[in-house]
Image: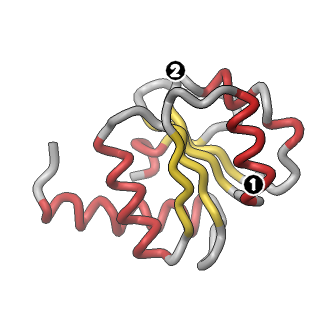
């Protein structure tokens, strides 16, 4: 739970994470496959601040759905949580445009950046 002031501050930091740690620029696309968590809103505001296009996805997407969205959008970054990461990882070999992967939560995975640590 965040106040509007905290959301503003955190969204500036998250926009910097997307721009610097993930190497995204204005107009780049990010696919977010997240359940209903506060970080979903944080990413929305951060993407608006940085001029990055957010492509939302629900936690009910299958690996095939995720793969289609990554290819059709030419997304350079994907954001998910540790529960959904295995489904996302199963389709990553076919994603030629993807540059970075962000995970939301306490866990860590090889090859993934942790959003909370970077904030």
Q: Residue 113 at what x, y percent from top left?
A: 58, 43
Q: Residue 34 at what x, y percent from top left?
A: 47, 37
Q: Measuring 59% from the left and 59% from the top, which residue is drawn there?
A: 21
Relative height, residue 58 to residue 48 (above, below):
above
Most foreground residue, 23 or 38:
38
Most foreground residue, 89 or 16:
89
Relative height, residue 16 to residue 105 (above, below):
below
Does dot 2 land on a helix, a strand or a loop?
loop
Q: Measuring 40% from the left and 42% from the top, which residue is drawn there?
A: 116
Check whether the beta carbons of the residues at disc 2 and disc 1 lie within 8 A of each other.
no
Q: Residue 93 at what x, y percent from top left?
A: 87, 36
Relative height, residue 114 to residue 31 (above, below):
above
| 68 left or right, relative to 78 | right
Q: Residues within 10 Å of mark 2 (few under 14, many from 20)?
A: some
Say which quarter of the image contains residue 84. top right
Q: Measuring 35% from the left and 69% from the top, which residue is drawn there?
A: 12
Q: Which mark is residue 112?
A: none
Q: Residue 80 at what x, y percent from top left?
A: 53, 37
| 12 left or right, relative to 88 | left
Say which quarter of the image contains residue 3. bottom left
Q: Residues within 10 Å of mark 1 (few under 14, many from 20)?
A: few
Q: Earlier in the sequence, mark 2 or mark 1?
A: 2
Q: Quadrant of the N terminus?
A: top left
| 61 left or right, relative to 91 | left
| 25 left or right, relative to 68 | left
Q: Which residue is mark 2?
A: 83
Does dot 1 land on a helix, a strand or a loop?
loop
Q: Which residue is mark 1?
A: 99
Front label number (2 vs 1): 2
């Amino acid at each position: 739970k965040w106040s509007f002031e905290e959301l503003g501050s955190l969204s500036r930091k998250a926009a910097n994470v997307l721009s610097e740690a993930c190497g995204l620029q204005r107009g780049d696309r990010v696919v977010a496959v997240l359940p209903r968590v506060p970080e979903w809103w944080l990413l929305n505001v951060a993407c608006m601040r940085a001029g990055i296009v957010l492509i939302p996805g629900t936690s009910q997407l299958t690996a095939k759905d995720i793969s289609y969205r990554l290819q059709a959008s030419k997304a350079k970054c994907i954001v998910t949580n540790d529960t959904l990461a295995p489904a996302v990882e199963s389709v990553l070999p076919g994603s030629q445009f993807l540059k970075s992967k962000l995970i939301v939560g306490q866990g860590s995975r090889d090859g993934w950046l942790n959003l909370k640590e970077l904030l």
